[in-house]
Image: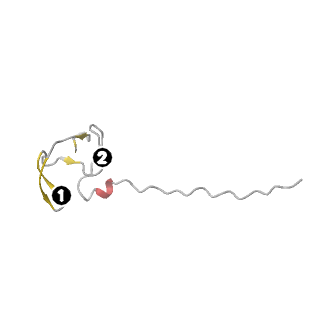
């Protein structure tokens, strides 16, 4: 899947060749400058708007921030009941 000029997911058939290390070499179907979805592909749907990240340096800035862990409120102190 690729990202078009409007930031929308667009399917694109490609042809892969040999492997280089753990990566496939794309031999057909992409042009220089095409943005390819490499993370979160299982969630990408054609036409969905996405926020593209450019290059490895941007990886950190595009990741979701870590969740904020909130502590539950402290229990209130027991109240004293007066006996009649």
The residue closer to the viewer here, 54 or 13, is: 13
Q: Earlier in the sequence, mark 1 or mark 2?
A: 1
Which residue, given by chain and number where applicable, does mark 1 sit on?
23
Q: Describe the element under mark 1 as helix, strand or loop.
A: strand
Please state the horizontal and vertical placement of residue 61, each as a whole percent of the image: 32, 56
Mark 2 residue element: helix
**Residue beneath the point at 60% across and 56% down:** 73
Judging by the rendered image, the residue that carries numbered circle 2 is 42
Residue 53, placed above or below residue 11 = below
Q: Using residue 2 as the reference point, say whether residue 16 is left or right of it.
A: left
Cα distance, mark 1 to mark 2?
A: 18 Å
Q: Tell me which corner region of the image, top left, top right, bottom left or bottom right, holds residue 79.
A: bottom right
Horizontal arrangement in the rendering, residue 78 relative to residue 35 (left or right): right
Residue 51 visible in the shown view: no
Position of residue 50 relative to residue 68, above or below, is: above
Q: Residue at x 73, y 58 (%)?
A: 78
Q: Residue at x 13, y 58 (%)?
A: 19
Q: Estimate the x, y position of residue 16 in percent, counting from the top left.
A: 13, 50
The image position of residue 7, as x and y in percent, is 26, 42
Q: Quadrant of the N terminus?
A: top left
């Amino acid at each position: 899947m690729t990202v078009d000029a409007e930031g929308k997911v667009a399917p694109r058939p490609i042809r892969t060749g040999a492997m280089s290390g753990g990566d496939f070499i794309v031999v057909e179907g992409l042009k220089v400058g095409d943005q390819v979805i490499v993370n979160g592909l299982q969630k990408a749907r054609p036409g969905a708007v996405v926020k593209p990240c450019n290059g490895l340096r941007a990886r950190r800035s595009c990741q979701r921030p870590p969740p904020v862990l909130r502590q539950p409120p402290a229990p209130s102190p027991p109240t004293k009941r007066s006996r009649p």
